[in-house]
C-alpha cells in the first residue's frame, strides 16, 4: 500500500497541463503525492474504489481539477468527508471555465470544497501545503520561506523599476 499526503486527481488527461503545476509545487515542498486520471462520469466504479482507499493510504488533502460540469471535486468531498478537498476549475472552450467554477464553488451545505481560481493549480498546492503545515513544522518552515521569497521578488522588482524608470523597465521585460 503506497502512502502519500496529497492526492491530485483530474477528470481527463487534457487537464494535466494545468494540474502539473500542483505537482511541481508539492515537489518543491517535499510533499508526497499521487496523481490520477479518474472520471466520476465515465469510470464511476474506479473513482469510488480509489476514494475508498485514500484514508488507508494516508491522504490528508485532495486536489481535484475538473472542467465543464466539474463534479469530480464535489463527489470526492462527499465520498471522503473527513479529508479536505481543494477544487480547481479548469478552463473550458465553451464558457472559459466559469461553468467549472460555478459547479465547484456552489456545493451544498455540509459538503464543502475549497475552490481556487480557474486553472489555479499552483494555488491549490499552496493551500494544500498550508493545511499540512498546521501539523508539520518542517512544512511550515518551507512554506514560510516560500512566502518570504514572494515578498523579496516584489521588493526587487520595485527597486529595479525605481532605478530604471518605467520605460527602462519595460525595455528589459
Image: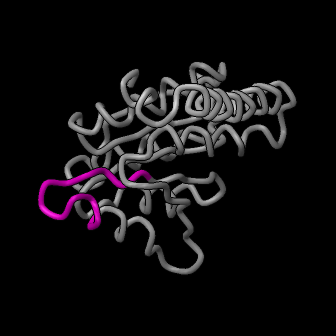
Is residue 66 shown above or below 113? above
Question: Nearest the camera: 26 or 5?
Answer: 26
Q: Is residue 43 left or right of residue 173?
A: left
Position of residue 171 measured from the top left corner of the image (x, y, whole percent)? 36, 24
Name the quadrant containing residue 49. top left
Q: Position of residue 121 (x, y in %)?
A: 45, 41
How many numbered discs sit on the rendered protein?
0
Q: Residue at x 12, y 61 (%)?
A: 94
Q: In this view, which residue lies farthest toward the right?
A: 137
State the residue in front, 170 or 95.
Answer: 170
Asked if 169 appears above or below 55 in the picture, the reply is above
Task: Locate residue 157: give its quadrant.
Answer: top right
| Residue at the left extreme, as displayed | 94
Taking 39 as reference, is 13 above or below it? Answer: above
Q: Which residues are magenta?
A: 88-99
Where residue 101 sits: x, y (%)?
Answer: 36, 64
Say whether residue 81 is left or right of residue 40: right
In the image, taking residue 84 as reference, residue 16 lies left or right, namely left
Question: Residue 2 lies in magenta, yes or no?
Answer: no
87 lies left or right of 126? left
- Please name whichever residue, 128 or 98, is drawn nearer the observer in this view of the structure: 98
Q: Name the quarter where the N terminus is drawn.
A: top right
Residue, far bottom: 109
Residue at image x 66%, y 19%? 30
- In the rendered structure, does residue 91 fall within the stretch colored magenta? yes
Q: Residue at x 71, y 42 (%)?
A: 130
Residue 141 location (% of width, % of height)? 82, 27
Amino acid at each position: 500500500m503506497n502512502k502519500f499526503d496529497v492526492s491530485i486527481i483530474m477528470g481527463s488527461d487534457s487537464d494535466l497541463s494545468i494540474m502539473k503545476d500542483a505537482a511541481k509545487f508539492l515537489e518543491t515542498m517535499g510533499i508526497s503525492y499521487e496523481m490520477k486520471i479518474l472520471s466520476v462520469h465515465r469510470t464511476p466504479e474506479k473513482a469510488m474504489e480509489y476514494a475508498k482507499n485514500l484514508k488507508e493510504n494516508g491522504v490528508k488533502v485532495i486536489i481535484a481539477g475538473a472542467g465543464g460540469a466539474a463534479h469530480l471535486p464535489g463527489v470526492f468531498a462527499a465520498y471522503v468527508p473527513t479529508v479536505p478537498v481543494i477544487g480547481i476549475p479548469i478552463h473550458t472552450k465553451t464558457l472559459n471555465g466559469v461553468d467549472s467554477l460555478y459547479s465547484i464553488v456552489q456545493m451544498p451545505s455540509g459538503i464543502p470544497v475549497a475552490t481556487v481560481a480557474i486553472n489555479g493549480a499552483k494555488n491549490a498546492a499552496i493551500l494544500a501545503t498550508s493545511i499540512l503545515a498546521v501539523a508539520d513544522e518542517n512544512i511550515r518552515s518551507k512554506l514560510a520561506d516560500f512566502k518570504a521569497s514572494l515578498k523579496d521578488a516584489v521588493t526587487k522588482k520595485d527597486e529595479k523599476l525605481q532605478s530604471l524608470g518605467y520605460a527602462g523597465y519595460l525595455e528589459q521585460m
